[in-house]
Image: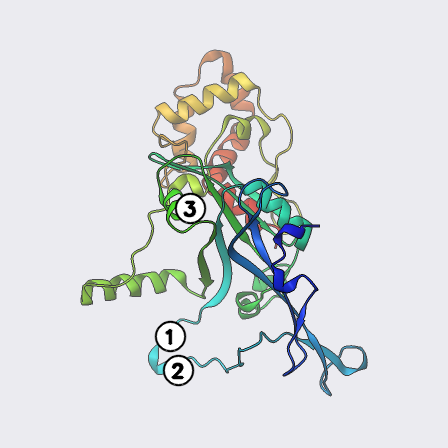
Amino acid sequence: MHPKLIPNEYGLGPIAYLLDGTRVFEAYADYAGEKGITSADVGTRLRFVEPFVVQSSTSSSKGGKVGRCNIPGIVNVPAEFPPSLNCHQAYFDHWVSNVTCRTGFIDTLEDVLSFVPIVDFNAGIVAKGKAQIKSTVTGNNGGGLPSSDTTNGIDADDALMDQGQIYLPINNTLTDAGHVYGFLREIGQGVQHIASRMRDIVDFVQRVNDKSIMFGEGFAFLSIPRSYYGILTVDMLVGGISPRRRGDGMDLKMTGEFLSADCAVAIHDICTSGGLLHDDSSLVLDATEDMIKMTIGSRISPVHRKEYVEKREGIVETILHSCYVNLYNLLRVR
């Protein structure tokens, strides 16, 4: 399917390791430019490891056989987190890649791994100053535990350690500024970083910041623009959202035309001029239902007042939802 991405040493197929029979196949992760047209970018490889089958007396699978996936050269070591060290257990969550052709890389992952786009952040565009990037999260569709909510019968620790759902954010740059542009220019296409998840991220960040102050050195955290998590758009106001999930299976989603386009534009303008939205259309974090109703209600023109009053609750809910809409669109698949 993608012969240009196959390294010469794998031209005859997977390589079997004599020690345990593990079969490994590698392919270049991306093209230098357009998918299928340009040559392979040899900077990053994807490694595929085929599990070998072993007998297990404790396995409930058919015939007592289970698949074990060992990476050659890597030895399993029990993870230990001594309470005396007050450790924060970290588990793999995702990796982020910077590429030249984002859509081509997404298509390649779909061809090879059946991964599909899960969410585009702000219709794909994230901006901070002169830096502008497009960002799409791809991954396996519907993997992992159904929920991390203990009230639904899923243990929180199981959800923390579960690796069934894969998220792969993919970025490309639109301008000659910012960290993605610098990464591609200095290093080339590849993995920008690997991210971990933990039980209490707030406590972890606080501890890191405290130690940085005490020792004068330590980690520094990126100042991620609010627009990355969600912005309010006219299209969101026009489409509206369905009732918030209340345990009855109802989901938050676009429902077609909720507001007229003219009314939606007027409300968006009021939210901007009234201080509810930042310049990038992200909602101020201290906005409340009462604040939104008061701001819009005192400024809405007579021509749109009737429509606003009739749909006020849904409008307010849509505005509040905008501050985390990208995260919701990403995580609701779990």
Helix, strand or loop at mark 2: loop
Amino acid type shown at disc 2: Pro
Amino acid type shown at disc 3: Leu
How many numbered marks does the figure carry? 3
Q: Is residue 143 above or below residue 173?
A: below
- The percent position of residue 46, horizontal first and vertical second, equals 58, 60
Disc 1 to disc 2, how far (Cα)?
A: 7 Å
Answer with the quarter of the image where residue 236 lies: top right
- The percent position of residue 210, horizontal first and vertical second, equals 24, 64
Quadrant that contains the C terminus: bottom right
Q: Nearer the viewer, residue 250 or 193?
A: 193
Which of the two discs, 2 and 3, sits closer to the camera?
A: 3
Q: Residue at x 57, y 26 (%)?
A: 238
Q: Is residue 7 above or below residue 292?
A: below
- The percent position of residue 73, horizontal first and vertical second, equals 54, 78
Q: Residue at x 52, y 30 (%)?
A: 315
- In the picture as drawn, the residue positioned furthest to the front comes out as 8
Q: Residue at x 63, y 74 (%)?
A: 69
Q: Which residue is mark 2?
A: 82
Q: Which residue is mark 1?
A: 87
Q: Which residue is mark 3?
A: 184
